[in-house]
Image (cartoon, rainbow, N blue to C red):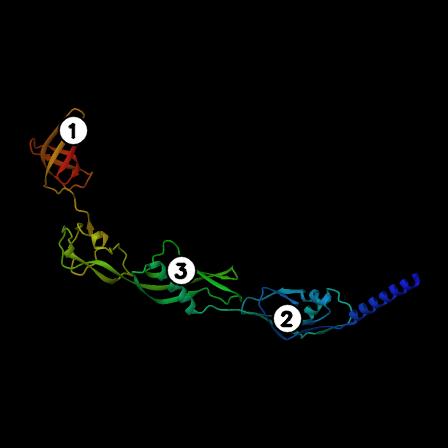
Amino acid sequence: MLRHVRSHVFINCVLYCLIQSAIAQQPITITIQPKAWVSNQRIYLKDIATINAPAHLSEKISNVYLIYAPKPGKSKVIKGAWIESRIKAINLHGNVSFSIPENIEITRASQIITQEDYFNHFNDYISKHIGTEVRFEVSRFQVKGDTPLPVGTLEIKVQRQASVDLRGYVSLTASIFIKDEFVQRVGLSGWIDRFEDIVCVTQPLNRSHVIEHRDVSLSTRNVSKVKDTYYTRIEDVIGKRIKRKSGNGEIIFASMIEVPPLIRKGDKVTIIAESALLFVKTMGIAQSDGYPGEQIRVKNTMSNKVIQAIVVDQSTVKVHY
């Protein structure tokens, strides 16, 4: 019985040795073409070579690190002898054969974003942030800083500085992400002709005229070069006073109008003087224009004295004792 067991063990050992010997003698072939394309930033042997090897060695050979890849769309040349030395450094034993050219040109795969794609992102950003009631046109569009990109899922995020107004010359920044990782920033710029319905004068208006509905209307204008504040609602200018003579069709700017004074120079007003123990009311004449809460000079018609009083409403001023 013991002799039978020993015989069985001996046979298994012999078979194992024969198998290992056969594996060791199985040829390993590594073939590299003169030109190769890669996608990733780091180049391993598996990226440029065809490897035939036993399973337990294939992964080891495949993961031999070679070099950093060139930039997307660029190429670099590697010496075949140097690659062979990198392979031999992992101490492969047995029948190993190489088919490696003297020089290997490695090119990094790339993708590009077209001018049209950038324009569409620029246009979409303007459309989203300028307002649905505003019509605009983009011209003189330019892209700066664009280069070939690594391959992979691409995303473009467009943004602007808070101070950038969306009219006239507009500069935006496009941040490029590949596989959710930031890659580069690209400058997008263009001229925005912006058309809005804004408040304009419908007839000549003299200085100090208080604006009424018949004096103004909405008119579509290109405001891309307008620097002053303008109005898009008629009600915002009704009751305001024109500060200078204005012609028919002229845009009404904030600098052209003002709130008319509550009391005008020469108006008759009631003067109220009061304290904890006293209340006096008399008449007076305003010596200057006055706004609510403002202190103006008022002539007391009873005493002919000029006093300082606070404007309360369009016919009343108040003196504090």
Three-letter amino acid code of the residue under disc 3: Leu
Q: As drawn, is 169 to the left or to the right of 277?
A: right
Q: Is residue 22 above or below residue 219?
A: below
- Where the N terminus falls, by quadrant? bottom right
Q: Report the residue marked by disc 2.
A: 48
Three-letter amino acid code of the residue under disc 2: Ile
- 2 or 1: tag closer to the N-terminus: 2
Q: Residues within 10 Å of mark 2 (few under 14, many from 20)?
A: many
Residue pictured at 7% horizontal, 34% vertical = 301
Q: Report the residue marked by disc 3.
A: 172
**3D distance between C-alphas at marks 3 and 1:** 62 Å
| x, y percent for residue 106 | 60, 71
Residue pictured at 46% horizontal, 68% vertical = 113
**Which of the two residues, 305 or 173, is positioned nearer the viewer here?**
173
Give the SS element for disc 2: helix
Give the SS element for disc 1: strand
Q: Farthest residue to the left: give it.
A: 302
Kindly indicate whether the residue at mark 1 contacts the one at mark 2 (C-beta within 8 angstroms).
Answer: no
Residue pictured at 11% horizontal, 31% vertical = 281
Q: Farthest residue to the front: give it.
A: 1
Give the SS element for disc 3: strand
- 2 or 3: tag closer to the N-terminus: 2
| x, y percent for residue 108 | 57, 69
